[in-house]
Amino acid sequence: MSLASLVGCQTAPQTASLQCGAGAAAATYLICKATGRSDRDCLTAGVVLGAGGAAICYTYASNLDKRKQQLAGQENNLDARIKYVRGLNEDSQQLNAELSKQVAATAQSTDALVAQIQQRKVSSERLAQEREARDNEVKAASAQVAKGNEALREVKAYRAQSKPASTELDASIARQEQLLAEAQRQVDLLAAQRARVA
């Protein structure tokens, strides 16, 4: 089994979730190899963490969909809307924690990879695989933020039309804006790490 086979799993049907997992797998493999462990040990660690990364990304998008289903039929109920946005806030807060961990892991693996590139210890094939895995990692993270922004736009459209004003809803919307801005900042950090692997 090789790193190529880890990256290759991205063509499976659950592409969005596997793309996140592949980035985590590649990062784990590089960190593990930097500690001098065997290919077999590092590939095993990469597969395990990669599967966890896939679950993280899939859970966020899935949670947003579930919350929207729970809101169905109650779209004009202010209390239901407040509960919905508070739920979005919880999901976005969790996403930020997961993205922060991903950024830290990616930064470590990028440092190791850049050092190997400078020492000319990376084949062009492996470098292409790393770039693809990191591109997919950024795309998957961006997709999560885009899904959150879509939900936020819908809530803001409701808020613009609702009367009377609700300070609870306004506060929850403001919190969601902050959380999504932080998530975008984390995605930008992932993209900056990808840019280092030129």
Image (cartoon, rainbow, N blue to C red):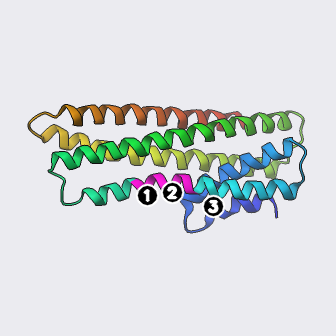
Query: What span is colored magenta in the figure?
Result: 55-63
Measuring 77% from the left and 33% from the top, which residue is drawn there? 111
Q: Is residue 6 magenta?
A: no
- Report the residue marked by disc 2: 58
**Amino acid under disc 1:** Ser
Separation (CA) of disc 2 from disc 3:
14 Å
Task: Indicate left or right for 119 with 83 as reference.
Answer: right
Separation (CA) of disc 1 from disc 3:
19 Å
Q: Residue 40 versus residue 111: which sits nearer the camera?
A: 40
- Report the residue marked by disc 1: 62
Q: Is residue 165 above or below residue 68?
A: above
Q: Residue 152 versus residue 52: which sits nearer the camera?
A: 52
Measuring 18% from the left and 56% from the top, which residue is drawn there? 74
Mark 1 and mark 2 in contact? Answer it, CB < 8 Å: yes
What element does badge 3 sit on?
Answer: helix
- Report the residue marked by disc 3: 10
The quadrant holding residue 70 is bottom left
Earlier sequence position, callout 2 versus callout 3: 3
The quadrant holding residue 115 is top right
Separation (CA) of disc 1 from disc 2:
6 Å
Task: Indicate left or right for 110 with 17 as reference.
Answer: right
**Amino acid under disc 2:** Tyr
Answer few, some or many: residues within 10 Å of disc 1's Cα (few below 14, many 20 plus, some between 14 and 19): few
Answer few, some or many: residues within 10 Å of disc 3's Cα (few below 14, many 20 plus, some between 14 and 19): many
**Amino acid under disc 3:** Gln
Measuring 67% from the left and 49% from the top, which residue is drawn there? 24
Measuring 19% from the left and 31% from the top, which residue is drawn there? 167
Query: Residue most toward the left?
Result: 164
Mark in front: 1 vs 3 = 1
Earlier sequence position, callout 1 versus callout 3: 3
Q: Is residue 121 above or below residue 70?
A: above
Give the quadrant of the N terminus.
bottom right
